[in-house]
Image (spheres, rainbow, N blue to C red):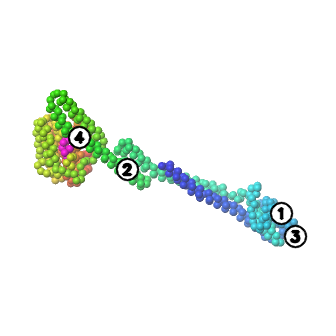
Amino acid sequence: MRWELVKVCLAVTAMVVVAFAVPFGLVIQEMASDRAFSNAERQAASIGPTLSITADPAQLRRAVESTQMGAARRMAVHVPAVGDSPSVDIGDGWADAHAVAETRRIGRATTVPLAGGGSALLQPTALGSGDIAVVEIFVPESEVSNGVATAWMVLAGVGAALIVGSVAVADRLGVRLVRPAERLADTARQLGEGRLGARVPEPQDGPKELRWAAVAFNSMADQVVELLANERELAADLSHRLRTPLTVLRLNAASLGDGPAAEQTRSAVEQLEREVDTIIRTARQQRPAPALGGAGAGCDVSEVIRDRMAFWSALAEDEGREVRLAGVGRTVRIPVARPELAAALDALLGNVFRHTPEGTPFAVDVHDGQDAVIVLVSDAGPGITDPDAALRRGNDGGRDGSTGLGLDIARRVAESTGGDVRLGRSVLGGTEVRVWIALDGRDRPAAEGAGARRGRRKRRGDRSGRSN
């Protein structure tokens, strides 16, 4: 593109130079010729007064030699025969007799090109007797073209300077155009190669259309990343929701006793569980998507907890777990869609059944505040050794085959409202997962505002631990 712009400017400037320099050079050449012949006409006219007075050859010769052209031996006078006097030629003539006779006949000045180079100006002049004499002035070629070569060289130099200048300007303009375009093309190539974090630095120079293109490209790239991340999150979340029935199947398969059928069932459940874990890990390899939920979404947290506990209570009874509910006796609305909250609760309760021994009691509490609703899931198990590491998003290095996504699902639900998730030691002696769901993120204290939440998310991105 840069070279194409240079070639265009080169062609345009060359055409402009030719269009103006060539006619101007021809005009200068014509002016030099006119100047030479005008000077010759003036020199021929200077002998006219003498011819009008006398036709004596001796006097005419002295008069011719006294002129500039005569002294330079470039003037000749052709006097016709007058009465008994014969025709006289004073000086060395260059034109032939026919040209002289023709000039005398037509009565006006003529120019005769000479074979040896140069031209002869023939100027008719009247004598005192009424006859016509012809004054001949030799005009050499050097005088006709005097200064023309210099003028052509000046024009050529000016034209070359204009062309070089236009190429330099075009090159600089090309750089301003090409560099932003190259950055845009390079970033598009990187994005096409799978580097989703590639963005175009907004150019400070160049045309505004390229700046708009850079902004539009970055916006498009953000949308692509967001869509891909949302798809992966959706795939991972849907796969993770399969963990709940898988947990039930695994526990039921464990109670089938011995036998080939029971062993095959347990083997199939384990294989299915491994496949689900593989899907989850694969789907979560990229950057996280924005938090789920949105404007207009909402549900009754108490009703959702009661519904999910009705499902999990049967399994808890089979394993001899004591379950305690608190704060779910009244309606508590939160800005979270029911499926998302149910998925988060299933993930947290699934962690309890998966990572604590049978018979371990657990509790679910709801605390309704003015600006937030807190859901506490507590157990009396062994607890989490490194709570900070357990909050790492999509951690695949947890214990017991953990995919590291259970707490992540709950955290995404909380952060969709401006809240967060924290881990601690419960009053039962085990793990306490606190899900803070903000009712209005703008009403939260400054210390718990968006900046603090972003800081926590950044710190969590550098940690590793276990969750499911």
Classed neighbour count for the residue bearing mark 4: other residues with Cα under 10 Å, few (<14), some (14–19), many (≥20): many
* Alpha carbons under labels 3 and 4: distance apart: 137 Å
Q: At which x and y percent is residue 185?
A: 42, 47
The amino acid on which the numbered mark 4 sits, given as a three-letter code, is: His
Q: Name the residue carrying label 1.
A: 89
The answer to which quarter of the image holds residue 237 is top left
Q: Mark 4 and mark 1 in contact? Answer it, CB < 8 Å.
A: no
Q: Is residue 227 visible?
A: yes
Residue that lies at the very extreme toward the top in this rendered image: 259
Looking at the image, is mark 4 or mark 2 nearer the viewer? 4
Q: Name the residue carrying label 4.
A: 240
Q: At numbered mark 4, what does the secondary structure look like: helix, strand or loop?
A: helix
> Does label 4 or label 1 sit earlier along the sequence?
1
> Does label 3 or label 4 sit earlier along the sequence?
3
* Alpha carbons under labels 4 and 1: distance apart: 125 Å
Split into 4 quadrants, where in the image is the C terminus?
Answer: top left
Q: Mark 3 and mark 4 in contact? Answer it, CB < 8 Å.
A: no
Residue at image x 72%, y 63%?
Answer: 37
The amino acid on which the numbered mark 3 sits, given as a three-letter code, is: Gly
The amino acid on which the numbered mark 1 sits, given as a three-letter code, is: Asp
> Does label 3 or label 2 sit earlier along the sequence?
3
* Alpha carbons under labels 1 and 2: distance apart: 93 Å
Position of residue 265 in the picture relative to residue 26 (left or right): left
Q: Which region is colored magenta? A: 341-348
Q: Name the residue carrying label 3.
A: 83
The answer to which quarter of the image holds residue 190 is top left
